[in-house]
Amino acid sequence: MNSQQKIAIAGTGYVGLSMALLLAQHHHVQALDIVPAKVEQLAQGISPIADPDIERFLAESKAGIRSLDFSATLDPAQAYSDAQYVVVCTPTNYDSDHNYFDTSSVEAAIAAVREVNQQAWIVIKSTVPVGYTRQLSQRLQDPRIIFSPEFLREGKALYDNLHPSRIVVGANLTDSAVYAAAQEFAQILRDAADPSELERVNSDGTRSIPVLLVGSTEAEAIKLFANTYLALRVAYFNELDTYAAARGLDSEAIIRGVGLDPRIGSHYNNPSFGYGGYCLPKDSKQLLANYEQVPQNLMSAIVDANQTRKEFIAQEILERIQGLDHPLVGIYRLTMKENSDNFRQSAVQDIIAYLLERGVDLVMYEPTLGESSFMGCPVIQDFAEFERSCSLIVANRWNEELASAAGKVYSRDIFRRD
Ligand SMILES: NC(=O)c1ccc[n+]([C@@H]2O[C@H](COP(=O)([O-])OP(=O)(O)OC[C@H]3O[C@@H](n4cnc5c(N)ncnc54)[C@H](O)[C@@H]3O)[C@@H](O)[C@H]2O)c1
């Protein structure tokens, strides 16, 4: 176990908050955010995001059951000035004008650190373009920058860090000081994992959590290739499902038969309206942009397949309301997954836009939304009223709540799981 360190976290979203609570088990952690409301909530021990382990850690810490050395602040000097590590967990949205990630928040956070602290090791946890850390380090003439990809799933953000699939730290390993810092940070992450993980046996027979120390560019590539593979897999089963639906075949039977090959497997194969959420759409586009002059077919296809799928789903919906007198289409939930608390870049939003362009009347049912309208469409808060008023209900994911309206529901959720 490493000695206690002072660690600052920039950004208290899914990645930053889970990192902060994870590391505060053994270290002194100051988490900084630029949004006062988030910091105020955290100061009261309330999680701004729905995540069972984050909520549990905060509650147990408040009740004195769990010891966490953690506080949140808006003041960069307080957070950064004496930190030994600063973990940057700020957004990197895809900028469609430049066809690249917008990394300005990462650079703003690093600039704020360097104003008050030249010595801290900066660990970028935000997802960045391939080659970014090395170029930034050269541009800023700052060798003390490391990249460590984050693999968590929303809703299980802290769980996935307590039980990590792997720990990857990327840095300029030819520099012995950088190597030592990368190794130490990997150890900090490993020590923070749930103790049961140190005993686990992996599918390849190895024990404990796999730890990879690699170049920063390789680490960035690991993150983007992993997410693009997940997007590929979703797109593949969605396109299989499109084929089955278009030809009147039993999609479920085909997927089951395909998955019984152990090389393929029966996991992560449930058709949906498209891959979505904050990461898969933007990360696959960024990887495609990174290919530049490198020959490829698949990367473009993975990006394009999602659009084609969403247009197919929208057409299917249009066909189902054709000929109806004043049809009203109800969108059941804006989220990507059951039990999710956010709908950033959810696939159904593109379907809504497509239907609105074609003049379809829509209403929404989204209990987590405090607004009375979304994308110009009314939001109905009462499910019974929603069910009564809609001619067709469109649901990316099934929920038992829909059982009474099953005859009206359009969904491609075959296996009724994420
Ligand atoms: N959400 C995921 O599932 C996930 C998984 C792996 C990697 N990532 C990557 O991690 C990064 C963060 O993702 P997220 O989902 O946690 O984002 P988020 O939007 O939930 O949180 C980001 C936080 O950073 C704050 N912030 C912005 N600029 C800041 C600054 N200069 N200083 C301090 N705080 C600042 C924002 O106010 C916000 O609270 C992104 O690059 C994302 O691609 C996300």
Image (spheres, grey):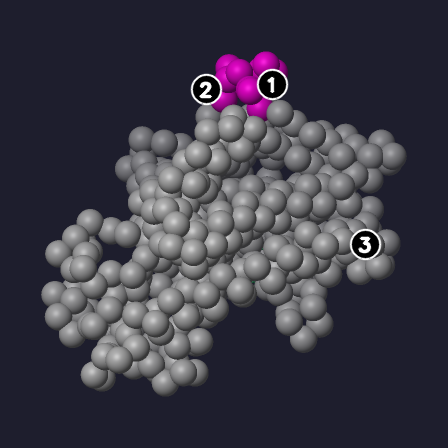
Residue 2 versus residue 343: which sits nearer the camera? 343
Residue drawn at (21%, 83%) of the image: 325
**What amino acid is at disc 3?**
Pro
**What amino acid is at disc 1?**
Asp
**What amino acid is at disc 2?**
Ser
Asked if residue 132 lies in the magenta stretch, the reply is no
| Highlighted magenta segment, given as a residue range | 197-209
Viewed as shown, does residue 85 lie left or right of 312? right
Evaluate whether residue 192 shows in this view. Answer: no
Are the residues at dot 1 and dot 3 in contact (C-beta closer than 8 Å)? no
Residue mark closest to the camera, 3 vs 2: 3
The image quarter in which residue 343 lies: bottom left
Q: Percent position (x, y) of residue 31?
A: 52, 50
Looking at the rendered structure, the secondary structure element under dot 3 is loop
Mark 3 or mark 2: whose residue is earlier in sequence: 2
Residue mark closest to the camera, 1 vs 3: 3
Per the model, the C-alpha gap separating discs 2 and 1 is 18 Å
In this figure, which residue is indicated by the disc labeled 3?
Answer: 295
In this figure, which residue is indicated by the disc labeled 1?
Answer: 204
